[in-house]
Structure formats: structure tokens, C-alpha cells
Image: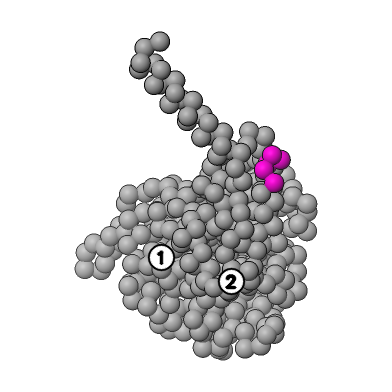
């Protein structure tokens, strides 16, 4: 055997031995403060014993994986917080992170559109699902636990599913995906964008069509520095039974300019466009793609019947479950936005990414959709940490004077988290 061959053999042997050592080492360990169950994952869990397996069903969470030859996997399964980047992850948790599950009793339906109104110290949350709701649930955070009241806007809004508070005018802006020609008191409604004064509950419609075509159902929205409202349009309303009309146009992302009334299509490349946000400096647009979900003419139910009502939806585990990013530039005297450089930055660990928000430090915080968890990543898509709940999470919202309380809302549950990762101050964001 030549000297080179001998060296290669020795190198391969050492590499194999190192790999075996790593594979047999515990992939997780207890870490961080004792105020919650915190687990640190070694090397992102990228090397597991060969006996591991996972059901590809999108409704099976990350913790549903089986790793029989590594007992430390049980730490991940029971953790409140899972840390992948130990330096940044433990920093965002702070010295005393806490999680509160089942803060208030709720119906076993989808909860969406959480909006915090600082002046009232109230959280507005929408309950989503057939036969549909004309009211909005408010949580008065001046009390602990919060007191709950269902309120109705004037005129009523049927099934908002995304919302944002605009500190410039004090209104809540809603993406309203409900459409029904047989609402109470002979009210008719097309899906679109509306705004609500949270103090008086007076509602005002802004847009409800694209050149006389129905929107399939605006799902989420964000307001840019110019004041334009960007919103995603999906047919979730039809598949969950709160719209009586199938889509007329492709699912897409739109931009509405309130000052002129113009509606412009901005992107049609995603199969199921969903959550939408701008980066802290407003130079990057992020949109989640829940493309593993699609319309199914045969009604089904969610795994374990957790929806409690039929769904005209099917799940494809090999479909897209990503977050995409675009560069945003402004052109012309009217600051017309142009988006370029589309790129994928993240693939969900479970379920499909749903609503997302931007933290004060620029991190993305993402609801798991079907999945009982929230992922925390940086602007490049690097996984830092995750929060694990007892219910699927559709969307999230910060509250509090320091914006360090995070509410996770979803199917059959509302969870509260207290940690050091602060939310973005919308008053400053809108001026970026």
C-alpha cells in the first residue's frame, strides 16, 4: 500500500469514528434558565441515529419524529423552548422566560388576526370557521387573566383573518376573507380590506375587488412606509366554508394605495401565499408559502378532527412550506415599489408557515400553521430557536409596554410567552 493510500485510509477511519461518536452522543440537553423547560439541540440535530423516522404527514409535528436510540430526544418533545443557536437563542429568552398555555378558554376553531392596540392595552382576536362570525374577541390586558368580550363593528365585518394596527391614524386594518350573500339583516359582503376604529368600533371598507373580479380572500396584510397596504390573497375562506364563491383569479399578492385607490398585483409565483411582512429597514419583503395545502372538492377533516368541521382542503407533504424574500426598491416621484431578487430563505420544520412578525432586532417569528409551534429565524433564514405549544399556531402578536409579551393564537388555543425578544415598535417601523 502506498503512503498516500495509507494516509487516506487512516483519514477515512478517523472521520468515520468521529461520525459514529457524534451519532451516538446525545443530540439534546437541558440548558438555560429554570423558569421553563428549555432544551438545546446539538449541531441542529443534523446527525441522528440511523433508527430515526418521521411520518411525512404535515399534521405530524417536529416532536412526532421517532428517535428510539437517543433518549435525549424526549427532552425536545417536552420542551417549551428549543434552542439551535445557543448564543443567540438563550439571549433572546433572557433570564426568566415563561410560557402560559390555556390563558383563556376558547372554542375549538381557528383563531387569527391578533392585533394589539397600545392605547387601550387590548388584544383583538378573530375566531375563524363555519358558520362564520360577525364578532371580534377582545382581551383586556389590564386584567390578569385578561377579561374577554366579544364586540361587533359597525357595520359588522364577516370573518377577518389578518390584521395590523396603524399608529399613524389609530385604526386596525383588516384583511377580510369572508364572503356570503346571506348574512344576517340582509347584509352582503365581498372579501377585501377594511379598517376599524378600535375605540368606537366604526368600520370602513377600503377595497373589495380587482376591476370587478372577486378576491379569493385576503389573508394577511402589512402597511409599508408610503402607506400602501400589501396583502396576500388565498381561497382559505372557501375551503373552510366562510365564503360561498370559488376563486375567480389566481392566488396572488397585491398592493393597494389608499391615496389613489389603485390595486396592483405584485407577485403570482407562490402556490398559497400567506403571511407577509417587511424587514425592519423595509428593504426586504417576506412572504410565507403554504403550498402544501390546496383545495379539495371532497370535504375532509383535520388530523384527529381537531377542526370540528369539514374542510375542503388537502395536504401534500412534498408541497412548498417555505418563506421567500424579495429586495424592495422605490422608483419615480410616487415612490413606486419594485420587488426583485426572489429567493427562498426557510423551509418549515413542520406544518406550513403561516403568519409572521418581525422582532425589534430583525428576527422573523413564524406561526407554524398546522403545527403546534413558532419558529424564530434571522433575516437569512438561519434557525435560532422555536417555541412549542399545545395547539397549532396560525399567527402571533406582541403586547405590553416593552413589547416582550408574545401571544400565539391558533386552532383551539391561545398561549402567552414572556421573554426578552421584543416586538417591533410599529410607530418607528412605519417611518423606516
Q: Residue at x 51, y 47 (%)?
A: 43
Point out the residue furthest to the top here.
1
The C terminus lies in which quarter of the figure?
bottom left
Please say whether residue 307 is visible from this viewpoint.
Answer: yes
Say which quadrant the N terminus sits in: top left
Q: Position of residue 228 (x, y in %)?
A: 38, 69
Q: Identify the disc placed on residue 151.
A: none
Disc number placed over residue 362 in the picture, else none: 1
Q: Are marks 1 and 2 in contact (CB under 8 Å)?
A: no
Relative to 355, does residue 98 appear above or below in the rendering?
A: below
Is 363 included in the stretch rendered in magenta? no
Of badges 1 and 2, the one in the foreground is 2
Q: Is residue 256 visible?
A: no
Residue 381 position in % (x across, y down): 44, 53
Q: Earlier in the sequence, mark 1 or mark 2?
A: 2
* Outermost residue, left side: 333
Q: CA distance from mark 1 to mark 2?
A: 20 Å
Circle 2 residues within 10 Å: few <14, some 14–19, many ≥20: many
Residue assigned mark 2? 97
Residue stretch in magenta = 67-71
Disc 2 is placed on an element classified as: loop
Residue name at image x 47 percent, y 30 percent? 15
- Above/below status of 405 relative to 27: below
Across the whole image, how many numbered discs are drawn on residues?
Answer: 2
Q: Quadrant of residue 5?
A: top left
Label 1: how many residues lie within 10 Å, few (<14), some (14-19) or many (20+)? Answer: some
* Dominant secondary structure, magenta: loop
Q: Position of residue 21 (x, y in %)?
A: 56, 37
Residue at 70% in and 61% down:
390
Q: Residue at x 62, y 84 (%)?
A: 141
Amino acid at each position: 500500500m502506498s503512503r498516500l493510500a495509507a494516509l487516506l485510509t487512516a483519514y477515512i477511519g478517523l472521520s468515520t469514528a468521529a461520525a459514529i461518536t457524534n451519532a451516538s452522543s446525545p443530540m439534546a440537553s437541558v440548558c438555560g434558565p429554570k423558569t421553563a423547560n428549555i432544551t438545546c439541540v446539538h449541531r441542529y440535530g443534523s446527525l441522528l441515529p440511523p433508527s430515526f423516522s418521521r411520518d411525512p404527514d404535515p399534521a405530524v409535528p417536529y416532536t412526532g419524529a421517532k428517535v428510539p436510540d437517543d433518549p435525549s430526544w424526549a427532552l425536545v418533545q417536552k420542551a417549551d423552548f428549543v434552542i439551535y443557536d445557543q448564543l443567540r437563542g438563550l439571549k433572546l429568552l433572557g433570564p426568566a422566560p415563561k410560557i402560559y398555555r390555556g390563558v383563556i378558554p376558547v372554542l375549538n376553531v381557528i383563531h387569527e388576526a391578533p392585533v394589539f392596540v397600545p392605547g387601550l392595552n387590548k388584544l383583538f382576536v378573530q375566531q375563524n370557521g363555519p358558520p362564520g362570525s360577525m364578532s371580534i374577541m377582545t382581551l383586556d390586558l389590564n386584567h390578569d387573566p385578561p377579561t374577554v368580550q366579544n364586540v361587533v363593528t359597525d357595520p359588522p365585518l364577516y370573518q377577518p383573518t389578518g390584521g395590523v394596527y396603524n399608529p399613524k391614524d389609530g385604526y386596525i386594518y383588516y384583511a377580510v376573507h369572508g364572503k356570503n350573500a346571506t348574512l344576517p339583516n340582509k347584509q352582503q359582503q365581498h372579501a377585501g380590506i377594511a379598517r376599524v376604529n378600535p375605540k368606537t368600533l366604526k368600520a370602513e371598507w377600503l377595497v373589495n375587488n380587482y376591476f370587478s373580479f372577486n378576491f379569493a380572500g385576503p389573508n394577511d396584510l402589512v402597511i409599508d412606509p408610503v402607506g400602501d397596504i400589501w396583502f396576500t390573497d388565498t381561497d382559505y375562506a372557501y375551503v373552510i366554508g366562510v365564503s360561498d364563491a370559488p376563486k375567480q383569479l389566481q392566488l396572488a399578492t397585491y398592493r393597494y394605495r389608499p391615496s389613489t385607490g389603485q390595486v396592483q398585483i405584485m407577485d403570482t409565483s407562490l402556490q398559497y401565499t400567506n403571511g407577509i411582512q417587511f424587514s425592519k429597514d423595509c428593504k426586504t419583503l417576506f412572504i410565507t408559502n403554504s403550498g402544501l395545502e390546496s383545495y379539495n372538492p371532497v370535504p375532509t377533516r383535520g388530523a384527529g378532527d381537531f377542526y370540528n368541521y369539514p374542510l375542503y382542503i388537502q395536504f401534500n407533504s412534498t408541497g412548498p412550506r417555505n418563506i421567500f424574500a424579495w429586495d424592495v426598491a422605490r422608483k419615480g416621484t410616487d415612490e413606486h415599489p419594485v420587488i426583485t431578487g426572489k429567493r427562498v430563505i426557510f423551509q418549515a420544520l413542520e406544518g406550513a408557515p403561516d403568519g409572521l412578525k418581525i422582532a425589534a432586532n430583525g428576527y422573523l417569528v413564524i406561526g407554524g400553521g398546522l403545527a403546534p409551534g413558532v419558529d424564530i429565524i434571522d433575516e437569512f433564514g438561519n434557525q435560532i430557536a422555536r417555541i412549542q405549544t399545545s395547539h397549532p399556531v396560525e399567527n402571533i402578536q406582541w403586547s405590553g409596554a416593552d413589547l416582550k409579551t408574545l401571544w400565539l393564537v391558533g386552532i383551539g388555543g391561545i398561549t402567552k410567552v414572556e421573554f426578552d425578544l421584543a416586538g417591533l415598535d410599529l410607530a418607528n417601523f412605519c417611518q423606516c
